[in-house]
Structure formats: structure tokens, C-alpha cells
């Protein structure tokens, strides 16, 4: 096995592990994911698929695409962590909105149409980082491994 393929397996395996962790929190820990949590899963799935292809098809293109997938989920995770910390507004479909100036009927309508899981709540954290924050940090590391694999593939 070449060093490049070894790195690809580590990077794709890292994305697979993060996905398994997310599903574990969801189905074993009973932490229902919000919309932005779900968005972070898609690039990991793509990275796993790209990893399988990159092991079978030599070259640098697929590892660079794996790096792009890891960077995409890192960016979503960082944005989500910022929403959780209140640094910026998240999508209106999964965060709480302002209630100033709303009538009772408008407020009730807003409450009834709100999603079950809000993106600006932190359901779990470790060492001051939420799951979204950890996803961002770990995914940046995975992106670096993907880039290293691409450079060794040439």
C-alpha cells in the first residue's frame, strides 16, 4: 500500500467515524439533530465515497475533492458553532426569531411553525466546544490529511 492510499484511508475513515459518532449521538444518545447538524453530514458522506474511489483510482484529483468535502463540512460546522454562541444569526428556519411587536396570534403562529430542534441550542459540549465546533476542528485536520494524500499521489 502506498503512503498516499494510507492517508486516504485515514481521512475517509475519519469522516466515517464522525458520521458514526453523529448517528450514535442521535440514535443511542437520543440527541435529535437540527437542520444544520444534518447539513454537516453530507460532505462527510461524500468524503467516504471519494475515499473509496481514491483508493481504487490513483491520482491527486480525488484526494483534492476529499479535501474540499472536509473543508465544506468544517465551514458549515464553524458557522453552526457561531450560531450556537450567538456570534451571528443562523437560518430563520432553525433559530429563534425576535418577538418584539408581534401580536398574540403572530407569536402563536411563530411558535407553532418553529422546528422541534433549534440550531442555536447547544445540546452537548466538551471542553467548551459543541459538536459543531468539534466537527469544524476535526474536519480541518482531515482536510490537511487529504491534501497530504494528494501531494503524495503525484
Image: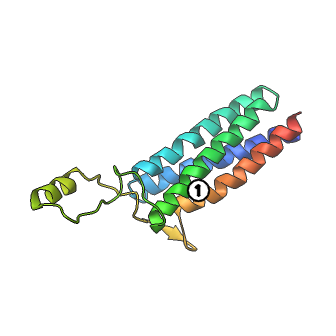
Q: Is residue 5 shown left or right of residue 74? A: right
- Closer-to-camera residue (41/75): 75
Q: Name which quarter of the figure residue 120 lies in.
A: bottom left
- Look at the numbered disc 1 and give the secondary structure of its residue: helix
* Quarter containing the N terminus: top right
The one of 154 and 30 positioned closer to us in this rendering: 154
Quarter holding the C terminus? Answer: top right
Q: Residue at x 72, y 46 (%)?
A: 11
Point out the residue furthest to the bottom here: 127
Nearer-the-camera pick, 112 or 97:
97
The reply to whether residue 24 is visible in this rendering is yes
Residue 85 pos. (x, y %): 47, 68
Residue 153 image position (x, y, % from top left): 86, 35
| Rendering coords of residue 108 (x, y %) | 14, 57
Residue at the image position 10 percent from the left and 56 percent from the top: 105
> Is 79 placed left or right of 8 in the picture?
left
Residue 18 seen in render: no
Q: Is residue 66 above or below residue 71?
A: above
| Left or right placement of residue 129 versus residue 52 in this view | left
When the figure is inspected, residue 1 is found, relative to residue 71, above or below; the finding is: above
Residue under numbered circle 1: 135
Amino acid at each position: 500500500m502506498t503512503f498516499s492510499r494510507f492517508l486516504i484511508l485515514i481521512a475517509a475513515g475519519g469522516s466515517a467515524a464522525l458520521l458514526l459518532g453523529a448517528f450514535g449521538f442521535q440514535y443511542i444518545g437520543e440527541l435529535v439533530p437540527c437542520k444544520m447538524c444534518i447539513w454537516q453530514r453530507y460532505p462527510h458522506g461524500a468524503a467516504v465515497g471519494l475515499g473509496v474511489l481514491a483508493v481504487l483510482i490513483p491520482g491527486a484529483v480525488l484526494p483534492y475533492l476529499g479535501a474540499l468535502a472536509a473543508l465544506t463540512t468544517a465551514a458549515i460546522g464553524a458557522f453552526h458553532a457561531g450560531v450556537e454562541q450567538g456570534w451571528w444569526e443562523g437560518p430563520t428556519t432553525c433559530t429563534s426569531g425576535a418577538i418584539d411587536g408581534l401580536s398574540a396570534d403572530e407569536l402563536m403562529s411563530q411558535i407553532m411553525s418553529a422546528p422541534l430542534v433549534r440550531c442555536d441550542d447547544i445540546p452537548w459540549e466538551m471542553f467548551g466546544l459543541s459538536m459543531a465546533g468539534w466537527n469544524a476542528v476535526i474536519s480541518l485536520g482531515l482536510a490537511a490529511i487529504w491534501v497530504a494524500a494528494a501531494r503524495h499521489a503525484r
